[in-house]
């Protein structure tokens, strides 16, 4: 029997689903998980669209959001804005 790899980007089809996914990863994951999640979201929306909105090239975007990458904070902020998100701090 052949199995296929689950691609979370296939399920990120609404702003609400994207927000829930990213908030969950921010709460439970580490920095690598957050970078991967942002990459999944960018893929779901479309890397070409995200590249245009951030002013980055698609190859640079893929490289910045790949496994093991350590993107600059400015890059993460550009991508979060391009995916329609924002960072907000709440007291715990």
Image (cartoon, helix red, strand yellow):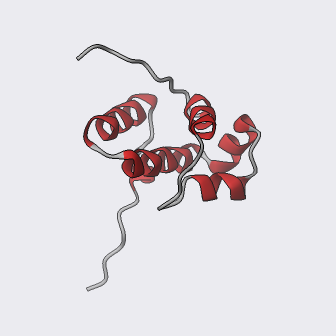
90 relative to 1, above or below: above
Image point (58%, 32%), residue name: 77
Q: Residue 48: percent from the left, percent from the top?
A: 70, 48
Q: Residue 70: percent from the left, percent from the top?
A: 53, 52
Q: Residue 75: percent from the left, percent from the top?
A: 62, 40
Q: Residue 51: percent from the left, percent from the top?
A: 71, 44
Residue 82 occupies quadrant:
top right
Foreground of the two, 59 or 12: 59
Image quadrant containing the C terminus: top left
Q: Is residue 82 left or right of residue 37?
A: right
Q: Residue furthest top?
A: 91
Q: Is residue 60 left or right of residue 85?
A: right
Q: Is residue 45 left or right of residue 21?
A: right
64 relative to 28, above or below: below
Image quadrant containing the N terminus: bottom left
69 relative to 26, above or below: below
Q: Residue furthest bottom?
A: 1
Residue 74 occupies quadrant:
top right
């Amino acid at each position: 029997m052949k199995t296929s790899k689950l691609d979370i980007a296939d399920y990120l089809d609404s702003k609400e689903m994207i927000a829930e996914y990213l908030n969950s990863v921010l709460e439970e994951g580490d920095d690598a998980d957050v970078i991967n999640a942002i990459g999944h979201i960018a893929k779901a929306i479309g890397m070409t669209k995200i590249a245009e909105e951030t002013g980055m090239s698609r190859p640079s975007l893929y490289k910045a959001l790949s496994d093991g990458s350590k993107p600059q904070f400015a890059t993460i902020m550009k991508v979060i804005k391009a995916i329609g998100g924002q960072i907000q701090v709440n007291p715990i």
